[in-house]
């Protein structure tokens, strides 16, 4: 009788453990595809993660914080979106520059996926810093960088994608790109 009771207790504990592990596996599997499913739902194909264009690291990691170097607007076919922004002076329109900022955001997300593997590990897009190659009479840099900010909100939602931000104009950028954007991102602890 004593052996029977001990066997029943062990069987019950093993059943509970198996059920808990099955639930854990299901939760982990569904968590690991949430953002990827969102990208698919939005019909977004990420470009290949970019390589640095000079002597620097594309990301630096300090604990749970990832510092993402300035990224450029590169499309899926490798086209670099270039040109000064300032429609009143013959430059790119706000809409064209917004699209360039969106492509830059896609490149940042691609880099993050390459760095962490599972985009559901992103805990917070902490800060985005956007630089717009613009004419001196162009004063809508904030509307341009919305291309990246709107994308982060579309993909990660609130609160994860909702971030602090700066947007500035400059008279030139490397390779004549329309925008360059860097980010600070917090990832979940393992």
Image (cartoon, grey):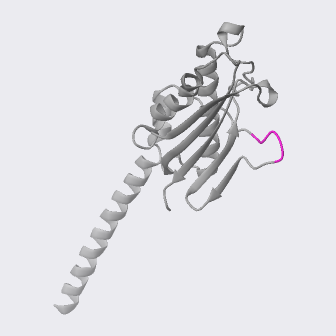
Position of residue 149 in the picture relative to residue 178 (left or right): left
For the question of whether residue 49 can be seen, the reply is no
Q: How many marks?
A: 0
Dominant SS of magenta comes to: loop
User: Which residue in the rendered view is the most extreme toward the bottom?
Assistant: 2
Q: Quadrant of residue 183?
A: top right
User: Which residue in the rendered view is the most extreme toward the right?
Assistant: 55
For the question of whether residue 158 can be seen, the reply is yes
> Residue 24's spot in the image, x, y percent?
37, 59
Position of residue 112 in the picture relative to residue 84 (left or right): left
Residue at the spot x=60%, y=20% of the render?
A: 139
**Magenta range:** 51-55
> Residue 173's spot in the image, x, y percent?
76, 29
> Residue 172's spot in the image, x, y percent?
77, 26
Q: Is residue 102 magenta?
A: no
Q: Is residue 53 magenta?
A: yes
Q: Quadrant of the N terminus?
A: bottom left
> Residue 117's spot in the image, x, y percent?
58, 49
User: Which residue in the rendered view is the most extreme toward the left?
Assistant: 1
Q: Quadrant of residue 167?
A: top right
Residue at the spot x=51%, y=44% of the render?
A: 125
């Amino acid at each position: 009788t004593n052996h029977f009771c001990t066997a029943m207790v062990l069987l019950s504990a093993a059943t509970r453990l198996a059920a808990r592990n099955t639930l854990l596996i299901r939760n982990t599997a569904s968590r690991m595809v949430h953002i990827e499913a969102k990208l698919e739902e939005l019909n977004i194909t990420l470009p290949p993660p970019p390589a640095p264009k000079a002597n620097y690291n594309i990301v630096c990691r300090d604990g749970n914080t990832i510092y993402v170097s300035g990224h450029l607007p590169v499309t899926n076919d490798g086209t670099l979106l270039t040109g000064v922004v300032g429609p009143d002076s013959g430059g790119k329109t706000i809409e064209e520059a917004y699209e360039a900022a969106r492509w830059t955001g896609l490149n940042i997300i691609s880099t993050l996926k390459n760095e962490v593997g599972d985009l559901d590990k992103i805990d917070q897009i902490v800060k985005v810093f956007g630089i717009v190659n613009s004419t001196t009479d162009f004063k809508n840099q904030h509307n341009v960088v919305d291309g990246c900010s709107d994308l982060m909100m579309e993909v990660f939602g609130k609160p994860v994608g909702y971030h602090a931000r700066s947007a500035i104009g400059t008279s030139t950028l490397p390779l004549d790109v329309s925008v360059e954007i860097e980010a600070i991102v917090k990832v979940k602890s393992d």
